Image: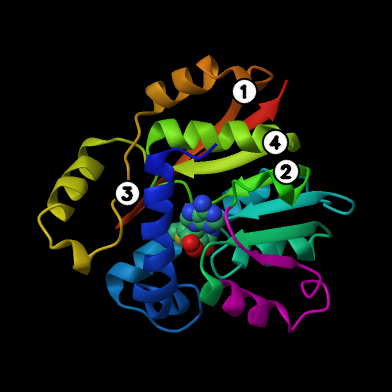
């Protein structure tokens, strides 16, 4: 069951990604020129997506993958090109519409099953791999672990996700962000200490059959995010 903090944050994210940030997000995830700061973010995000895709099997034929919080669908597209059957879900109908349009050009990606909704939805069925790139970074650690617990019930092999690592630099950004009026900024990112996250994962009964695998931090200018792999023991 989603908690009150999860539901509140999900509502804020839906408004932000479906209205406030649509144009910026559309541009950032395209080849269109962007300013210097956004270019560092784009480069970092490209590296992160490449990392997560590298952690999936090279041949994805016959594999079912959930792209949880797919945004404009870049990861879903790459996974589908490698043969996966992809379900890609996001809260934002506008971003899902854009992702669907972008996937139309290639017969390999036209098969992606795009959905508007909550990645927590248990009715989405079972998957070989679940990938959540930068879609959990706005949730509190307890809610992140709860979502992972939900994914674990319907994942067979691995769950890949990213979190915002708690570091002095990121905490400075985070505190600086608090100085801006709420309407001007995205819902806060929730920095999480890696040790605390590992302990919370180890304590969660629903994740008892899962262990932390690879982890990698990507820092590129204004983008910092850390990938983590959970594998079925
Ligand atoms: C920072 S964007 C990342 C999008 C995409 N994964 C990427 O890396 O390009 C975060 C996305 O997660 C989506 N999101 C956040 N919470 C979600 C939820 N509970 N269910 C589905 N999507 C969610 C947002 O709508 C947003 O599009």
Please give the name of the residue rendered at 88% of the width and 54% of the height, measured from the top-left corner.
Answer: 61
**Which structural element holds mark 3?**
loop
N-terminal of the pair, mark 4 or mark 1, is 4
Residue 115 colored magenta? Answer: yes
- Residue that mark 3 sits on: 189
Reading the image, the residue beneath label 2 is 129
Q: Which mark is residue 158?
A: 4
Magenta residues?
A: 96-118
Q: Is residue 229 magenta?
A: no
Residue located at (57% from left, 54% from top): 118
Q: Residue 215, how many percent across, how many down?
A: 52, 34
Q: If you read the primary sequence from the N terminus, does the residue marked by circle 3 or circle 2 appear first?
A: 2
Residue 42 percent coordinates (x, y): 43, 66
In the image, which disc is placed on residue 7?
none
Residue at (50, 40) in percent of width and height: 2
Residue 121 seen in the current view: yes
Nearest the eye: 4 or 100 = 4
Q: Quick one: which residue is furthest to the left in this view?
A: 179
- The quarter of the image holding the C terminus is top right
């Amino acid at each position: 069951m989603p908690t009150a903090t999860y539901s509140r944050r999900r509502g804020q994210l839906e408004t932000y990604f479906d209205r406030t940030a649509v144009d910026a997000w559309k541009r950032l995830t395209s080849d269109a020129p962007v300013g210097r700061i956004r270019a560092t973010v784009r480069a970092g995000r490209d590296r992160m997506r490449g990392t997560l895709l590298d952690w999936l099997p090279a041949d994805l034929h016959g594999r079912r993958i959930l792209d949880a919080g797919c945004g404009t669908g870049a990861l879903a597209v790459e996974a589908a090109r490698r043969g996966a059957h992809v379900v890609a879900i996001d809260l934002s109908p506008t971003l899902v519409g854009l992702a669907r349009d972008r996937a139309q050009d290639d017969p390999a990606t036209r098969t992606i099953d795009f959905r508007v909704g909550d990645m927590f939805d248990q009715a989405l069925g079972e998957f070989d791999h679940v990938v959540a790139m930068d879609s959990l970074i706005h949730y509190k650690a307890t809610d992140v672990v709860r979502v992972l617990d939900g994914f674990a019930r319907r994942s067979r092999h691995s769950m890949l996700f990213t979190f915002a690592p708690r570091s002095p630099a990121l905490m400075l950004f985070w505190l600086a962000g608090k100085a801006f009026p709420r309407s001007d900024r995205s819902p806060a990112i929730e920095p999480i200490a890696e040790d605390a996250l590992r302990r919370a994962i180890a304590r969660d009964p629903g994740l008892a059959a899962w262990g932390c695998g690879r982890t990698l931090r990507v820092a590129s200018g204004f983008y910092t995010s850390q990938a983590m792999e959970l594998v079925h023991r």
